[in-house]
Structure formats: structure tokens, C-alpha cells
Image (spheres, rainbow, N blue to C red):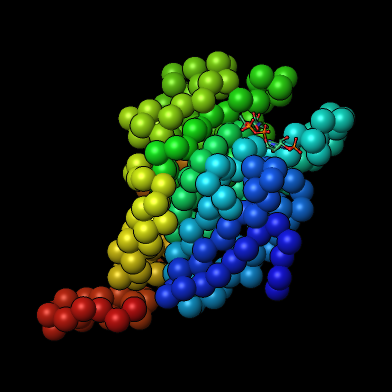
Amino acid sequence: MKRKNILFKIENGIGLITINRPDQLNALNNKTIEELHQQFEEIKNDKNIKVIIITGEGDKAFVAGADIKEFANFSKEQGKKLAKNGQDKLFNLIENFSKPVIAAINGFALGGGLELAMACHIRIASENAKMGLPEVSLGVIPGYGGTQRLAQLIGKGKAFELITTAQMISSKEALEYGLINHLESQENLIQKCLEISRQIMKNSPNAIAAAIKSINAGYNKELNGYNEEIESFGNCFESDEFSEGTQAFLEKRRPNF
Ligand code: COA
């Protein structure tokens, strides 16, 4: 289905989603969140897509935040609804997606933009990227999971500093903080994401989905990550991919997942 605010293409098993509002620095308005939700739902069970890369159109921004123009006059109830709707429909959907989602941070990733990147499983940023959660400078706080995921990724002390100062950091600092996995030149950003995707695609999709579920369980207060791991580990033994993976090893050949 053709969508207005995002572009989507599939190449060799990799889905590339591009947020396409460059004149607004790809700010996440309601419609864009809805379209992203629909896109992720549409590819959820598509076995031909193994990895998803998400980026922003243009060379200036990944996503410069939630759309400030859209929420400027919101009431308390509308504010709560905005955060809950976004978390349920998009940010948690991505975090729990059974296929790896890679954020290709090609410029500003601020507020909701950094929150979107943090919901992804892997983050690669270009040298020109700038990251931050500047919400307190607008009199609000991060509402798409930023207070939680930033502390998980870089530790509580640094998260307190970044959020309370509202400062932006460079991709070099983000790499030192552990906020991003790799730093690349802008020309090589997508290439690096494709390279990691191809590496992932050599492995069992079923086992990858189980690993994502187990890692996330450790950050969910209602679950026990170790128990989830035992459960998922056991389930893998019933899968055809496990038979193929172990058989291929014994036959000294590459597995065909
Ligand atoms: N929401 C809505 N519109 C946004 C936006 C956002 N988060 N970020 C940028 N835009 C819009 C600008 O309003 C401008 O639109 P206009 O031409 O219709 O006025 C356009 O994108 C270009 O942005 P501009 O501010 O002119 O670019 P810049 O290079 O001077 O500055 C930033 C870039 C990222 C520093 C600046 O746009 C900014 O501070 N954005 C908001 C960041 C933020 O606070 N995000 C958290 C939101 S919760």
C-alpha cells in the first residue's frame, strides 16, 4: 500500500523504511506514526523479509522529534493519549518485533527521533548525526519510552545528565556512551547497515526471534529473563531450523534457513 509519509522497499530480504517528511526534518506526527505502525504490521509475518532498516529522508535528519506543531495546544488527557498511543502502536511494537530492526541515524535524532532509534535493536549513526532528548527545554519530558530506554542503554547517571541538560551529543560521544553500535561516514551508513543485515541473515530467523524475546524479557519487570531464556531455548529444539543448523554443521556445509 502506498503511504504518504514513509517510503518502503524490499531488497534481497531486507526491508528499508524511510521516513519521508524532509521539509519538517522527518518529525513524527500522528499520521507518520500510524503509517509506520501499518508498515510494521504488514511485514510482521512476511517470511521474505528478514531484517528491517529504518532511516530518514534527506541528509539532515533521521527524525527531529515528535511533531511539536501538532501537540503544542494539547491538554493533559491528550498528552497522555499521545504518549500511550505512540508507545503501544510503534515504539513497543518495534522493540518486540521478531525481526531485527536497525536504525540508520543519518542526521538529527532528537526527542521522539532518538526514542525511535532506541526502540530499534541496533543503532548505526553517521558522522553528522546529533542525538539528544531536549523535551525538558519545551516544558515536557520524553514520552515514547525515552526515560526508560536511555537509562537502559547508557546507564542512569548519563541519562539523568542528557535529559536534564537537554543537550545534544555528537555521534562520536554517542559511540563512547554505548548509545550507538557503530559510527560511519554518511556515504557508508546504509552500506554498513546492509552489511550487518547480511550477517544476521545467515542465521536462523526462528532463533533470532527467540533471542530478541529473551533479551527483552530481562528488561520487563513482569517477566523473568532467565526463565524466558530456558523456555525459548527449549522451544528451539522443536524447530526445523535447529535440525537444519545442526545437520549442516555435522555435514560441514552452510545451513539453509
Ligand atoms: N516538530 C515539528 N516541526 C519540526 C520539528 C519538530 N520536532 N523539528 C523541526 N521542525 C521543522 C521546523 O519547524 C521547520 O519547519 P518550517 O520550515 O515549516 O518552519 C523545519 O522543520 C526545518 O527546521 P529548522 O528549525 O528551520 O532547521 P534548523 O536547521 O534551523 O534546526 C533543529 C534544526 C533540529 C535544531 C531544530 O529544528 C529543532 O530544534 N527542532 C526541534 C527539536 C526538538 O525539540 N525535538 C523534540 C521534540 S519533543
Residue 230 picture location, percent across and down: 36, 56
Q: Going by the image, does 236 lie left or right of 64?
A: left
Q: Going by the image, does 48 lie left or right of 2?
A: left
Please name the residue shown 33% across and 61% down the image.
195
Above or below, comparing residue 241 to residue 52 in the picture: below
Is residue 254 something that shows in the picture?
A: yes
Residue 223 picture location, percent across and down: 50, 46
Q: Which quarter of the frame holds ligand 1? A: top right
Q: Going by the image, does 218 lie left or right of 144?
A: left
Residue 161 picture location, percent across and down: 49, 17
Above or below, comparing residue 241 to residue 103 in the picture: below
Please name the residue shown 45% across and 37% down the image.
128
Above or below, comparing residue 176 to residue 250 in the picture: above
Please name the residue shown 84% across and 36% down the image.
78
Q: Nearer the viewer, residue 193 or 160?
A: 193
Residue 246 picture location, percent across and down: 22, 76
